[in-house]
Image (cartoon, helix red, strand yellow):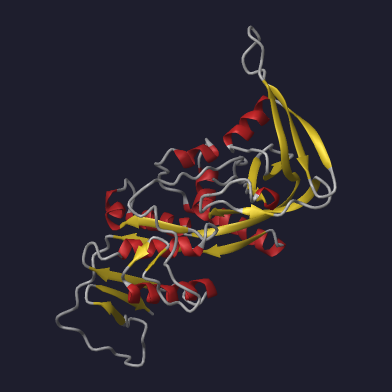
Amino acid sequence: MAAVNVSTGLGQEVKDITRIERIGAHSHIRGLGLDDSLEARMVSQGMVGQVNARKAAGVILKMIKDGNIAGRAVMIAGQPGTGKTAIAMGMAQALGTDTPFTTIAASEIFSLEMNKTEALTQAFRRSIGVRIKEETEIIEGEVVEIEIDRPAAGTPAGGKTGKLTLKTTEMETVYDLGQKMIDSLTKEKCQAGDVITIDKATGRIAVLGRSFTRSRDYDAMGPNTKFVQCPEGELQKRKEVVHVVSLHEIDVINSRQQGFLALFAGDTGEIKPEVREQIDQKVAEWREEGKAEIVPGVLFIDEAPKPKPNPTPTPNPNPSSSSTRCPTLTLTPTLTLALRW
C-alpha cells in the first residue's frame, strides 16, 4: 500500500492512493533467482528451470537498472507454458516496488472503449514514475505498549480512547489516542516491538519493521519479517518523505472532477492532450527545483503476436543502418529473447 500527496495546481490534492495486488498464477515469484554473478539457481525465488533464459533476463535487468536500454524493446517468444510471463514477473519483482512495471495484454488495446493511440499512451505513462520529495513532520519510535480503553455498555459507539507509548534510544513518551488513530493502528496491525512512523499532518501510520531487540521473541518468523534499529534522538523530527507515482495517476487525478477517486473507478476514459501538456510542464518545473525526478519503468505486453517474416524482403537503401535490425538470441529450443535496437 502506498500513500501519496500530489497536487499539480490543476486539480485537488490527493491524500491516499491504495494499490491492490491480486493473487494470481505468478504471485509466488519474488525475482529471477540469480546470484551475484548472474548465474541462475535451479530453484530460487519461485523460479524453476529456464536457466539460460533467466540469465539473459538478468543481463537485460542490469541494463535497465543502469539506464542503458531506455527506449528499446525486448521480445520474449516461445510456446505456451514455457515461462515467458513468469520471467517478466521475475524482472518486475527484481526491479523493486519503486520502479513502475505495467502489464497489459495485447487484446486489451483492441477491446477498450478508446482509440489505440490513447490506450498505448496510457500504458506508457503508467510505466513512467515521478519520485516526489517533500519534507514533513513525523513521530518515529518503537512501540512499547498500546492500551485501548473499551467503552462501557450504553456509551455511544465510536468512543474508543487509548494510550500509545513510543520510545527511542534517548526518550520515551505516552500519547493519547482517539478513535481514528486506534483504527489506523488496528488496520496496520501494530503491536509492541514494531518501529512505526506517524505523519503529524495526515495521521498516517507506517510500520517500518520489527525492532532488533524483539528478534528473539519468536522461534520462527515469516520470510517478509523485517528488522530495523530502534530510532535515535527525539521522537518528533522533520524527515524527507519520498513518494513514487506514475504520470498516468497524475493525469487521472487532474482530469476528473472526483480527483483521485477516479483511480478506483477502473474506466478512466480518454484524457485530453492539453491536460497532459500542463502536467508535463509542472513535472519539468519540479525537476528543475529538485522536488522530483523521473523514474523510468517497464511496459510488458503479454500475448503479443510474433511478427511474421516478410517472404520477399525489400533491399535496405542504407545497409549501414541498423535501426530496424532485431537480432534474436535463442535461449532454449522453446524460448527466445529478441532485442530491438
Q: Nearer the viewer, residue 295 or 172?
A: 172
Toward the top, the furthest residue is 154
Q: Residue at x 52, y 35 (%)?
A: 258
Depicted 220 relative to depicted 95: above or below: above
Depicted 304 relative to depicted 175: above or below: below
Q: Residue at x 42, y 62 (%)?
A: 45
Which of the 4 image quadrants contains residue 137? top right
Depicted 87 relative to depicted 211: above or below: below
- Residue 129, x across and y down, in percent: 54, 58
Q: Nearer the viewer, residue 144 or 94?
A: 144
- Residue 181, x across and y down, in percent: 67, 31
Question: Is residue 307 shown left or right of residue 87?
Answer: left
Question: Is residue 163 shown left or right of residue 271?
Answer: right
- Quadrant, the C terminus: bottom left
Give the total number of marks visible in the rendering: 0
Q: Nearer the viewer, residue 12 or 158?
A: 158
- Residue 199, x across and y down, in percent: 71, 42
- Residue 33, x across and y down, in percent: 42, 68
The reply to whether residue 9 is visible in this rendering is no
Q: Residue at x 27, y 63 (%)?
A: 304
Question: Is residue 4 shown left or right of residue 126?
Answer: right
Q: Nearer the viewer, residue 38 or 114?
A: 38
- Quadrant, the N terminus: top right
Toward the left, the furthest residue is 311
Toward the bottom, the furthest residue is 320
Depicted 206 relative to depicted 98: above or below: above
The reply to whether residue 282 is visible in this rendering is yes
